[in-house]
Amino acid sequence: YGNNNVNCVKVDSRASNAVSELADIDWDNLGFGLMHTDYMYIMKCSKDEGFSKGELQRFGNIELSPSSGVLNYGQGLFEGLKAYRKHDGSILLFRPEENATRLREGAERMCMPAPTVEQFLEAVRVTVLANERWIPPAGKGSLYIRPLLMGSGAVLGLAPAPEYTFLIYVSPVGNYFKEGLAPINLIIETEMHRATPGGTGGVKTIGNYAAVLKAQSAAKAKGFSDVLYLDSVHKRYLEEVSSCNVFVVKGNLISTPAIKGTILPGITRKSILDVARSQGFQVEESHVTVDELLEADEVFCTGTAVVVSPVGSITYRDKRVTYGSDGVGRVSQQLYSALTSLQMGLTEDKMGWIVKL
Ligand code: COI
């Protein structure tokens, strides 16, 4: 049970919920908050059968044992990806197989079985189609897709759960930060850390996100958008922001912290590295120091939720450094436009990243 080689039985793919009308909501003011949509997808994994017989259910609460592995010992992972509606009515996903693979890698670290890549992709497809009326009109936002994998079986002593649940729910979203597309203001956290070497910082386990809430809440109370974490050993190298990866621009060089077990391998991060390279930038995954950050021309963050978010200022030990003069930096803007045009199907997909439903 400690590996991913569980039986794979083809997922029941119900006919999509054919609806021609959009949900009746204010599409012009989407933020990043949960909206209850029509359906969620659930697939259970038992010891004997593996993951099988996934099905759509009406969106709603789920039942869990009080002693489930996820509630007691944090045995859980999540993913995030988006569906966009194109002007011609088609629905586009961005690199969903990357999420499927990352979930499987995380599951291995957390001692969980995981759906196959094919099961994951089929589950995403049927869930998005069943909730089609919640996909924002072209240019108004996207449908955020949140897959969860959890130890749903009951345990008391510390051990992997005896049963697992894979679930997907969706919600229409707009901009993640309340600043919208305007630059965000970050503060560097010098006491608390997000991850440690040998820990789980490099996988998308739920506990990584609970661990940043204290620093994030304190930063927000002081008016900052979010927190930038440093490595826990030297307290000198950049790691990531609570909800996204970080990039530093100096001249033609774009640097981001290298993946080394404490940093989440973001799919947007990886895509931006490729897009930047294809646009003639020199790109580097390395140790990025606080000094390099403070001397940068531009700083931006990347993530599925945040897309490409320019950083307007960084505060470090009571010193505030600002970037650009208020507006969005040239490189951040260029990369944001290149990525979102691809995701929304406005430019040719030379990378083979788009999956049309
Ligand atoms: C995402 O970008 O999809 C994430 O998972 C980050 C989350 C904290 C919103």
Image (tube, grey):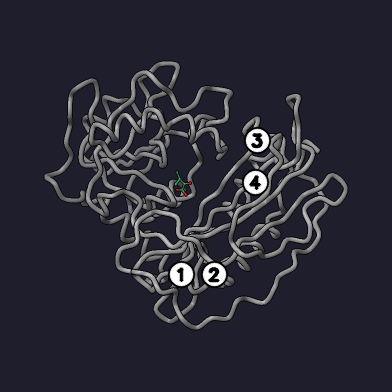
Pointer 3 with pointer 4, Cβ within 8 A: no
- Residue annotated with mark 2: 131
Asked whether the beta carbons under mark 1 and mark 4 sit within 8 Å of each other, the answer is no
Q: Is mark 1 on a helix, strand or loop?
A: loop
Q: Dot 2: what SS?
A: loop
Q: What residue did someone put label 3 on?
A: 75
Residue 303 image position (x, y, % from top left): 42, 48
Tell me which amino acid carries mark 4. Answer: Leu
Residue nearest the observer in this picture, 164 or 264: 164
Q: Which residue is disc 4 drawn over?
A: 149
Percent of width and height locating residue 259 = 49, 34
Q: Distance from label 1 to label 4 (Cα)?
A: 23 Å
Residue underneath mark 1: 135
Left or right: 45 as drawn, with respect to 97: right
Label 2 amino acid? Asn
Give the alpha-carbon distance from disc 1 to disc 3, as whole Å. 31 Å
Q: Which residue is drawn at 35% across and 51% down?
A: 176
Q: Can you say which quadrant of the picture contains the C terminus?
A: bottom right
Kindly report the distance in space between the C-alpha atoms of the residues bearing marks 4 and 2. 20 Å
- Respond yes or no on whether mark 2 lies under 8 Å from ligand 1: no
| The one of 24 and 191 positioned closer to us in this rendering | 24
Q: Which of the labelled discs sits on residue 148, or is there none?
A: none
Pick out the residue farthest to the top.
Answer: 234
Is residue 232 shown above or below 149? Answer: above
Q: Is 289 situated left or right of 93 in this image?
A: left
Above or below, comparing residue 304 to residue 58 in the picture: above
Determine contact: label 1, label 3, CB under 8 Å: no
